[in-house]
Image (cartoon, grey):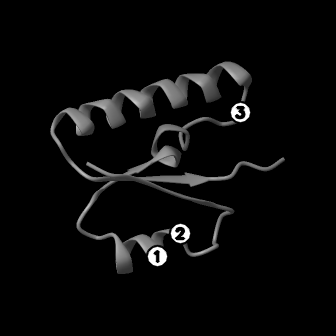
Amino acid sequence: MKITIVMGISGSGKSTYINKYLKDRVVIDLWDFQKDYHFFTQSNIIESYKKCMEKLQEELKKGNDIVLEHTLLRE
């Protein structure tokens, strides 16, 4: 099992890179756990990290190689 982390600002080519070079892996995008927030607070960011971690653990238990995609937040 492998976990590859692809991190960067919005529009930097993370998804393009993943689709080109890592398409055989399960992609877990942290943004999927954050996109419904209207604004970010410490508690909802921590909540999104916990949900993401649960998904990572679920996929690891299945023996899958994973890509964790993380868009850096900015003010």
Secondary structure state at the residue bearing disc 2: helix
- Residue 25 figure quarter: bottom left
Q: Residue at (26%, 53%) from the top-left corner? A: 65
What is the three-letter code of the residue carrying label 2? Lys
Secondary structure state at the residue bearing disc 1: helix
Q: Residue at (73%, 26%) from the top-left corner? A: 41
Q: Residue at (56%, 75%) from the top-left corner? A: 13
Residue position for label 3: 40
Contact check, label 1 and label 2, Cβ < 8 Å:
yes
**Pair 3/1: label in front:** 1
Left or right, residue 52 beside residue 24: right
Establish if 44 lies above or below 28.
above
Which label was assigned to residue 14?
A: 2
Establish if 38 lies above or below 14.
above
Q: Residue at (20%, 32%) from the top-left corner? A: 61
Say which of 32 and 18 sits in front.
Answer: 18
